[in-house]
Structure formats: structure tokens, C-alpha cells
Amino acid sequence: MCETAGVVIVDEMHLRRPYPDAQFFIGAGNAAEAYLRVQDAGANMVIAGCDLSPTQQRNLENAVMVRVVDRTQLILDIFAQRARTAEGKLQVELAQLEYLLPRLTGRGTEMSRIGGTSAGGIATRGPGETKLETDRRVVRKRIGILRRELQHVVQHRAVQTKSRRELLVPSVALVGYTSAGKSTLLNLLAGTDILADARLFATLDPTTRRVELEHGHSILLSDTVGFLRRLPHSLIAAFKATLEEVVEADFLIHVIDASHTHMERQREAVLEVLEELGVSRKPVITVFNKCDLVRDHYELRRLIADTPDSCYMSARTGDGVVYLYRLIEAMVARLHRRLTVILPYERGDLLAVCHDRGRVIEVRYTPDGVRVEVELAPDLAFKLREYEVDHSDEEQ
């Protein structure tokens, strides 16, 4: 992440403690050592690979005498670099301000010394602390504005989702750890040229494209922001509008970098985020991507054997994509209902819908109307229920 943010690492400290220190997180002794190492290396910033409380961050800054950035702040900086659309910038700014607000507290002790030193509390609110309260109000006001603007985005996205639902085409969301190859896979399946970059969080805004399948089926495939191990809750909340694509999807395609050393940890991190979003029970197709970079294909076969509805492939080269298409076809078929209807001859519009939106198995022309055996999405099957044939009556 540091390299992605454009940071040059000049030294590292690896520490193991039974529990974090309340004041310095790493302890007073380690904080003193960090100061010496900062001076020796000439560093102008310390980055902590974990989340710090406002007090811990302030104490560490006082100890090492340079700016201290924690894990969430680093992720937010990367997000700020990646944001391109208005929606993405709104979401990043909201997350940054919500992170900043509690950290405005704590500087009040230093600032309040300007105004007086009465031990009884009289005259202790100095100009500095008044400025702090002003800053808090400004930040809270801006957060309120951003939340209202994002609410408009959510409403607009709900209209788009409703329009897509009316197409009666299954919606599918690509999910996975950042840099797992989701955008590359979307380009392969949909024939698009969306930015696909190996850098972390190259995709912040959802992109939806239609993918045509065999047998007349099609899906709407959406790319989403990459997940991360211990993804901060503030980011999940800020990117709720983007992650709505995951919530509204009929099923998910979980893309996993099969060549990564920590593949299992990344896989578990994605499943944890899906659990937080409340979509862990949705049907999932698992794609072990980047198989061209994996030497041990026996391990890939073991993963497939142990994981339902899975395949391995390379989104970059296209090898193995045929297996993914088969899985998608099978999943779409599960979402469809097979039924037999007799449509009146004057309802040719419904027959056209069956051909356009479903998979027609058999058509017969009878004196009562057009008898059609078809597989349809549940929404459309519901609309045709008045024309459905009751097979029990036929048997009698």
C-alpha cells in the first residue's frame, strides 16, 4: 500500500506485543527507538500498519517529531488518488472527514493554554479552543452536505436499478480482493476496455455492462471496488452507494488471485466484508484467476474440487473462460423458472417476450392458443401466471 501511495520506505520496525499500549500503541520504549530511527534515516513520516486512536496518534507524533499516518489514513490517501468521478470524490471526502473529526479533539488541550491557566476552570476556554469548536462545526456541516449529496446518488442509483430490473435480466456483481483481476475479467466477458490496473483500488466506481450468453440468455455484469483485509468500517459506510451493486445482485462472481501467496487470507477477507454487507447467503461463483501464473495445477484442481460452483482461468489470456461461461449459464438457469403457458393469439407481445427474455424450449400452435414451454426469470413468470397450464388438470 505504501508503494501504491507513492511513499518511499527508508526503514521498517516489526514489533510483537501481547496487547497495544494505551498511550503509544507500541509502548514508550519503542516510541523512543522509533524517534532515533527516524533521525538516522531522515524520514519525514511514520506509517503504522494498523489503526491508531486519536490519542495514540498524537502521542506518537510528539514522540517521533514527524507526522504519523495509520492504516486507514493511508487507504484514504490511495482512494483520494484513485477517485475520478464526482461520486467517487464525494465518497472519499466523506470518509476522510469522518476520520478527521475525532482527531480534531485532543489538540484542544494545547490550544486552550492560549486563553488562561485558572485551575478552577474559569478562563480556560481560550481563543485556540474556540477555533477548535469552529473547525468541528465546519467539518460536521460539510459531512452533512456530503451525506445529503450521496443520498441523491443512492436515489439515482435506485432508479437505475429499477430500470434494469424491468429488463428482467439477471444482475451479477464481480467481487474480490483488490487487484484480483475483476476489471480484466469484465473486459474479457463484455468486450470492453475499462481501466484494468494492477495497482490497489484502481476501480472505485461501479461499471455495469451487458454480457450475452448462449441459448438467448444475458446478464448485467457490474465491477465493484476491491475489498481489503480489515477494511475500515468508515469506508464500507462511505462506499455504501457503490456497494449497493453487490447488495442488489442476483448472484456474485468472487474473483480470487490464485497466484497470490496469501490467497486464503484474501479470500477470507472478502467473505468477511460480504458478511458485513448481509449478502453472504447469495449464490456465488468462485473464479480462481491468474492460473497462468500458478505452477502447481494439482493445487488448482484441489481448490475446484473443494469449492462448489468454481473454476480456474486467466482473465488476461482468456484460458478457461469457457468453464466460467458454463457456470454462469447454469446459475442463470437456476434463477429461471420452467413453465408451460397457453398464450392467446392476440398476445403476440408475450410470445416475443418469451423469445427475447427467456429460453423457449417448445412452441406448439393449438386451437386454444400458442402453447409455449419456456424458462423465464421469476418476475416475468409471475406476469404470465394467468396463462400457465395446470399439469394436474391435464393428467386427469
Image (cartoon, rainbow, N blue to C red):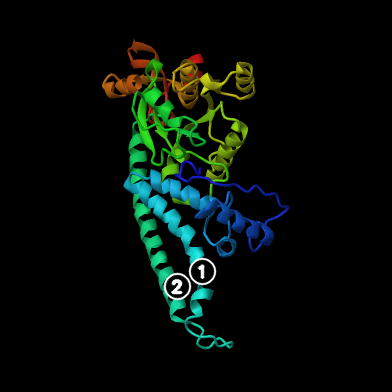
Marker disc for residue 70:
none
Q: Is residue 91 left or right of residue 269?
A: left
- Residue 103, given in percent of the width and then of the height, sits at 51, 64
| Real-space CA distance between mark 1 and mark 2, rounded to the nearest whole angstrom | 8 Å
Q: Quadrant of residue 119?
A: bottom right
Which comes before the other along the chain, label 1 or label 2? 1
Position above or below: 168 against 84: above
**Which residue type carries mark 1?**
Thr
Q: From this viewpoint, which residue is outermost toward the front?
A: 40
Position above or below: 171 against 292: below
Q: Give the SS element for disc 1.
A: loop
Q: Which residue is at a point 44% across and 43% down the rendered structure image? A: 244
**Which residue type carries mark 2?**
Leu
Q: Please name whichever residue, 77 or 371, is drawn nearer the observer in this view of the structure.
A: 77
Q: From this viewpoint, which residue is outermost toward the right?
A: 18
Q: Which residue is at a point 37% across and 35% down the rendered structure image? A: 207
Position above or below: 253 against 279: above
Question: Number of callouts in the render?
Answer: 2
Q: Is residue 380 left or right of residue 117?
A: left
Read off the residue under disc 1.
105
The 10 Å Cα crowd at callout 2, few under 14, some 14 to 19, many 20 or more, is: some
The 10 Å Cα crowd at callout 1, few under 14, some 14 to 19, many 20 or more, is: some
- Residue 214, given in percent of the width and then of the height, sits at 40, 16
Position above or below: 274 against 303: below
Q: Is residue 295 left or right of residue 162?
A: right
- Residue 324, given in percent of the width and then of the height, sits at 48, 20
Read off the residue under disc 2.
132
Q: Quadrant of residue 208?
A: top left
Circles 1, 2 touching at the beta carbon (< 8 Å): yes
Q: Give the SS element for disc 2.
A: helix
Q: Please name whichever residue, 75 or 304, is drawn nearer the observer in this view of the structure.
A: 75
- Residue 121, given in percent of the width and then of the height, sits at 55, 86
